[in-house]
Image (cartoon, coloured by chain):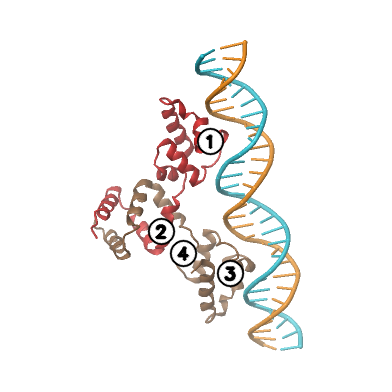
Chain colours: A red, B brown, C orange, D cyan
DNA sequence: AGTAGTGTGTACTACATACTACACATTCAA
DNA sequence: TTGAATGTGTAGTATGTAGTACACACTACT
């Protein structure tokens, strides 16, 4: 699923039970022109900036990282984490590229539980 | 150290033992105008594109990830790795943010050695 | 029947990114 | 001592990014 059509599906699902999720009202809350949001949802224009995506995510209660990913972007704060320890995190990510989800998840849990 | 001045230091160190590392000759090999490389090294203009940074890194035998980091950028291939499994890798990176280098390195080694 | 709200087409615009092209003064080497 | 090579200042350009502004046709109430 691409960014725009995904947004449209999510928004229309909400609209079906809440009239305040019309394109125009979402656009107003997110502070962009309705015509622009319309074009975004149809993929007529590329996905908007990270900041705008975050406001859309907040309004639709979607995961910002997922929306950013659909937009082909990586959150600026994640980029900073990598940049601060560049060669180390570059190696780590390339190692993890082929590691299955469940194994990565195990690492996430181990780190969270302080197994280091 | 910022991107430009770092480049200058690295290049001049090489120049001191190899005359082919003049600004003009490096610029020629890297396929940018000498005036542009001059401005990059002095920080008069922002760092160049990822592709140009990679060519500079290759010519100066520097780690591309480190140069990209100094330029405030994250390699496109690393971004793709995160994007493909967005919420998972986002969580992982935020967990690892405060984990000390040696612990991250342990994880890198464990993954490499297939401890999963 | 009218008006409020809906989505969308067209036309612009401001700013950033990523450079090139050329001229110039200085320094180095034969 | 002159020709080649060096680094740099100024000016300009092409493309991408991230939108705004307005008009229009349609629909949904009341």
Q: Is any part of residue A97 visible from this angle?
A: no
Q: Which residue is mark 3?
A: B42
Residue B104, by quadrant, is: bottom left
Image disc number at residue B30:
none
Classify mark 2: helix, strand or loop: helix
A92 or C12, nearer to the observer: C12
Residues tagged 4 and 1 counted as in contact (Cβ below 8 A)? no
- The chain letter for the residue carrying disc 1 is A
Judge left or right: residue A48 versus residue A100. Answer: right
Other-residue count near label 4 (Cα within 10 Å), few / some / many at <14 / 14–19 / ≥20: many
Q: Which mark is residue A37?
A: 1
Q: Is the residue A104 above or below the residue B109 in the image?
A: above
Of tags 4 and 3, the one toward the viewer is: 3
Instruction: Tell me the CA gap for discs 2 and 3.
Output: 25 Å
Q: What number of labels is visible? A: 4
**Looking at the image, is mark 4 or mark 2 nearer the viewer?**
2
The chain identifier of the residue carrying mark 4 reads B
Residue on which the image places disc 2: A82
C-alpha gap between disc 4 and disc 3: 19 Å
Q: Which mark is residue B64?
A: 4
Between residue D11 and residue C28, name the one nearer to us. Answer: D11
Q: Earlier in the sequence, mark 1 or mark 2?
A: 1
Q: Position of residue D26 (x, y in %)?
A: 57, 20
Q: What is the CA distance from the residue labelled 1 to the residue labelled 3?
A: 41 Å
* In-image side of C12 versus A19 (left or right): right
Q: Secondary structure at mark 1?
A: helix
Circle nearer the N terminus (4, 3): 3
- Label 3 neighbourhood size at 10 Å, few (<14), some (14-19), many (20+)? some
Q: Chain of mark 3?
A: B
């Amino acid at each position: 699923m691409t960014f725009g059509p995904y947004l449209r599906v999510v928004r229309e699902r909400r609209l079906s039970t809440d009239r305040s999720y019309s394109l125009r009202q979402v656009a107003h809350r997110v502070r962009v022109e309705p015509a622009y949001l319309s074009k975004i949802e149809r993929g007529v224009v590329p996905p908007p900036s990270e900041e705008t995506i975050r406001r859309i995510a907040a309004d639709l209660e979607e995961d910002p990282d997922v929306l950013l990913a659909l937009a082909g972007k990586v959150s600026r704060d994640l980029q900073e984490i990598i940049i601060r320890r560049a060669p180390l995190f570059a190696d780590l990510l390339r190692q993890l590229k082929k590691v299955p989800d469940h194994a990565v998840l195990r690492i996430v849990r181990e780190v969270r539980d302080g197994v280091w």
